[in-house]
Amino acid sequence: MTRYRYSPLGAVIMLLLVMCSPVLADDYDDAVRLHKQGKTAAALKKVDAAIAANANDARSRFLKGLILTEQGNTKGAIDVFTSLTSDYPELPEPYNNLAVLYAGEGQYDKARESLEMAIRTHPSYAVAHENLGDVYAKMASEAYDKALSLDRGNKTAQTKLSLIGELFTAAAPLENVPAAAAPSEPPAAAAPVSGKPTPEKPAPEKPAPAVAAAPPAKPATPPAQPQMSQRPAVIAAVGNWAKAWSDQDVDAYLSHYAADFMTGRQSRSEWEQQRRARLTRPKFIMVAIDEPVVSFSGEDSANVRFLQHYQSDTIDSKGYKTLTLGKSDGRWLIVKEVFEN
């Protein structure tokens, strides 16, 4: 099953709305805390109280949409996000989450329209681009399936449908990063590069004596390119790191750093103590990543550069960060972290 990516309570919407929407801080902060603890019913009561105090507060309305989605109240969530797109048409997140809900209902045309609106308002919104690709793939899958129901012998449609199925099967389980689809047929062998054409060997005048033919050599399987096979796992590792940070789960957060992580002039214990204080001090933390670019330097080393959005009850910031990750015992762990001010 395709897992479309929701926009979290954070990123662009938080950066834009903190300045324009006053909120009853106690009720809203309590709602955020209860939501992060998984207490959705209690969080919904608090967020309703915040909305009652200020019906124009977009942050509380957005949070309510997330809570209703998690409770399985799809119609209620659709109503909330639709209202937000009407009142705040410049924000991409409500469009994206509305599209995810429509896609879950099989309404792919509506999902496509919502995602196109999200991209129109924010062309660099990577999550919406990714979800739009998944929606197009699902629409194509349905079309190929329909073609096969009308003509079971259509081999071309069978091949295309199979490739789409492989794409979703290979997607990373947490971040749903689409795996690159394999080509429908292998590339042709490259012609030899030379200044002169390669002469053809003359045909023998007499057939060679019959000899037992050696079995054909099994062609060597080329090593998988790291960009093709490891990118989903790397992106998933970065996504899980950001989630642990947002959840203020210090142990999970620290587990994403390798034993040889570069802590600068601090000892590892001093660095961990500092990070523990910075994660637990705020009332809430929201971390979102956008525009991730992955590059590899060997099979066990990767760099991920992305736009980081960070918000807490005291800080709003964004900037580009580069994480260098190394593969250890099957896990991608952070060995270096650089933030570009």
Image: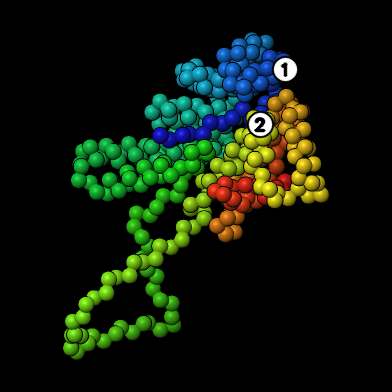
Residue at position x 25%, y 40% from top?
147
Q: Which residue position is annotated with label 2? A: 249
Toward the viewer: 37 or 159? 37
Mark 1, residue position:
25
Q: Residue at x 67, y 26 (%)?
A: 17
Q: Is residue 50 left or right of residue 135?
A: right
Which label lies toward us, 2 or 1?
2
Colour mode of the rendering: rainbow
N-term-proximal mark, 2 vs 1: 1
State left or right for residue 148 relative to residue 93: left
In this rendered view, identify the residue nearer to me: 290 or 83. Answer: 290
Q: Residue furthest right?
A: 265
- Can the viewer see residue 64? no
Gap between marks 2 and 1 measured at Cα: 23 Å
Location of the N terminus (image quadrant): top left
43 displayed left or right of 264? left
Give the crowd class for mark 1: few <14, some 14-19, many >=20 residues within 10 Å.
few
Question: Residue 54: percent from the left, percent from the top?
Answer: 67, 13
What x and y, as percent, mark residue 134?
Answer: 44, 39
Q: Residue 312, percent across and down?
A: 72, 29
Question: Which quadrant of the rendered structure holds the C terminus?
Answer: top right
> Label 2 is placed on what type of residue?
Asp
Element under label 2? loop
At horizontal 44% and vertical 82% (from top left) the residue drawn is: 195
